[in-house]
Amino acid sequence: MSEEQKSSYKLIYFNARGRAEHIRYIFAHAGVDYIDERVPKERWPEVKRSMPYGMLPVLEIDGKPIAQSNAVGRFLARKYGLAGQNEWESMLCDVLVDTLGDLKLAIKNPFTNTNKSFFLNKFYTLNIRKTIELTKFCPTFQSLIFQYRTEEDPLKKEEKKVKLLKETIPFYLNKFEQTIVENGGFAVGSVTTWADFVLAVALENFEQIFGVAALDNYPGLRGLKQRVHEIPEIVEWLAKRPLTDF
């Protein structure tokens, strides 16, 4: 633990990258020691009761639990010099991260009004097949991404992929691409920020779902992900992190 580190941290999440990975990037980049607690699915019902809002991730700071991944990311970014070079850039980081959140909402089924944590709770307390069965009766569980990833009919899967790639996602990716090109390869300003990490994690998941060719029209986005993944501290983290599906 470095001399400058005054707090102890424990990051609690599932054995996944998901909504906690950008926090792990921040810790890696800052060289901060922390406990990376990964909750097995069989323990989730028990752990859930002790979480502030019954969802993950949660960061314990000196034993005090803090929920909401972006709030945690924002706090750590400001503490460890990843929130831009001034207040304006700090705000722009928030704008980009929140807009990426809008993209995640945009790809959800128009009828959905249930927050993501409820789905995750069901995902980890039931097996995946039962969760899929639930979506037939409860459209609030559904999202286009989830439907695409779990669709078994090749033709229907391709239709869902085309809808996502042609109609929903390009609007946001084009905006992000323009911003990154204007900033010379950075999400905000001219230095690495936590917004770069949030985007890099999202783009890694995007390529995993749709294939690496899905970013062919977005060289700025691809370049940003590559740049982040070439940062020595991130390289070290990527080499040792647990291999997970998502």
Image: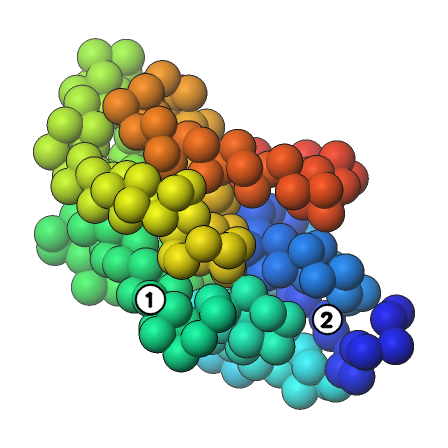
Q: Is residue 1 above or below residue 108?
A: below
SS for dot 2 = strand
Q: Secondary structure at mark 1?
A: helix
Q: Vertically, is 98 above or below 182?
A: below
Locate residue 190, reporting x and y percent. 45, 54
Q: Is residue 153 left or right of residue 228?
A: left
Q: Give the crowd class for mark 2: few <14, some 14-19, many >=20 residues within 10 Å.
A: some
- Foreground of the two, 178 or 113: 178
Q: Residue at x 73, y 85 (%)?
A: 63
The amino acid type found where label 1 is placed reads Leu
- Total labels: the figure holds 2
User: Relative to residue 193, is residue 229 drawn left or right?
Assistant: right
Q: Quadrant of the N terminus?
A: bottom right
Instruction: Please name the residue that numbered disc 1 is placed on.
Output: 92
Task: Please state the horizontal and vertical placement of residue 237, each as a whole percent of the image.
Answer: 72, 44
Q: Which mark is residue 54?
A: none
Residue type, label 2: Lys
Extreme residue toward the top, this view: 155
Crowding at dot 1, Cα within 10 Å, few <14 / some 14-19 / many 20+, comes out as: some
Q: Which residue is nearer to you in this view: 98 or 29?
A: 29
